[in-house]
Image (spheres, rainbow, N blue to C red):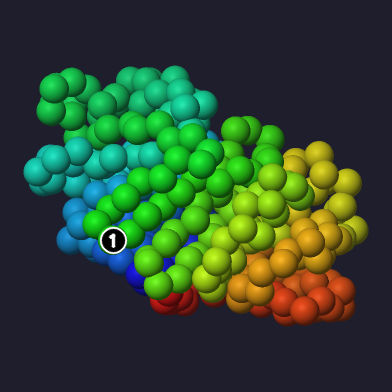
Amino acid sequence: MKLTVLGCSGGIGGASSRTSSFLVDEDILLDCGTGVGDLTLDALRAVDYVFVTHAHLDHIASIPLMIDSVGESRHFPLTVYGSPETLRILRAHIFNWLIWPDFTAIPSRHRPFLRLQPIKVGESVRLGERAITALPAHHTVPALGYCLDSGAGKLVYTGDTTYCKALIDVLNRLSDLRHLIVETAFADEQHGLALASRHLSPALLATMLDELEVSPQVYISHLKPGAGERIMAQIARRGGALRPRALVQGEVLEF
């Protein structure tokens, strides 16, 4: 499998600041932030599945725009996977005919452009030889992470989360975990804000990584614009065996 980073920033502001969105092979999106807007129409049409971690705007912003752009030219619905709570939020607050049309009923409920499919922690979706499994996460709204399994290796994307013992326990049971994409949204001097908003700071990240018994390459995402270098310097000063590095927009990870 191949994951291409369309966006991994914690905010916008410049061509290199696109929010969370990752293209897997040609037909899967992990989250659907502003980075999806850089794909061509043909590339958008090729996407059949979106796996959403949670309902915050920086992770879902391009879903309504994407389905509006390509829904009519597709032959079957775009399927969006997420927790039941996340899908309820999307129905109530996005696809409600007020913020955006309800594409689960356009052109009809029997043949819609969009299908919302619930997935719960521990459940897997198999797409050919590939498997995508929902993982626990701990955020201010119901949230998931995802494990992608190619059959030859695994990649985990945590989405937005603070320290989560249940997630650590799952990671320690994964064989062939090659890549771990984990957020660190706030610097250590904003540790209190990180706790309140249920994000990671370098101190919380270090606690999490110290409990890992696996040794993937660790990539840091969701760095706040303007604070990335400071956060990464604080992560580096804390040391540790895994030596995380900042994820870069446009980067490709294979596994």
Left or right? Give the position of 35 relative to 179. Answer: left
The one nearer the camera, 204 or 9, is: 204
133 in relation to 154, above or below: above
The one nearer the camera, 130 or 3, is: 130
Q: Position of residue 11 (x, y in %)?
A: 60, 55
Q: Quadrant of residue 38?
A: bottom left
Residue at 52% x, 71% y: name it: 176
The one nearer the camera, 48 or 168, is: 168
What is the quadrant of the N terminus in the image?
bottom left
Residue at 38% x, 67% y: name it: 151
Three-letter residue code for mark 1: Glu
Q: Quadrant of residue 200?
A: bottom right
Residue at 86% x, 74% y: name it: 238
Residue at 74% x, 47% y: name it: 165
Q: Position of residue 187 (x, y in %)?
A: 81, 61
161 in relation to 216, above or below: above
Residue wearing tag 1: 129
125 in relation to 130, above or below: above
Residue 161: tell me if it is visible: no
Question: Number of marks in the image?
Answer: 1
The one nearer the camera, 215 or 92, is: 215
Q: Quadrant of residue 186?
A: bottom right
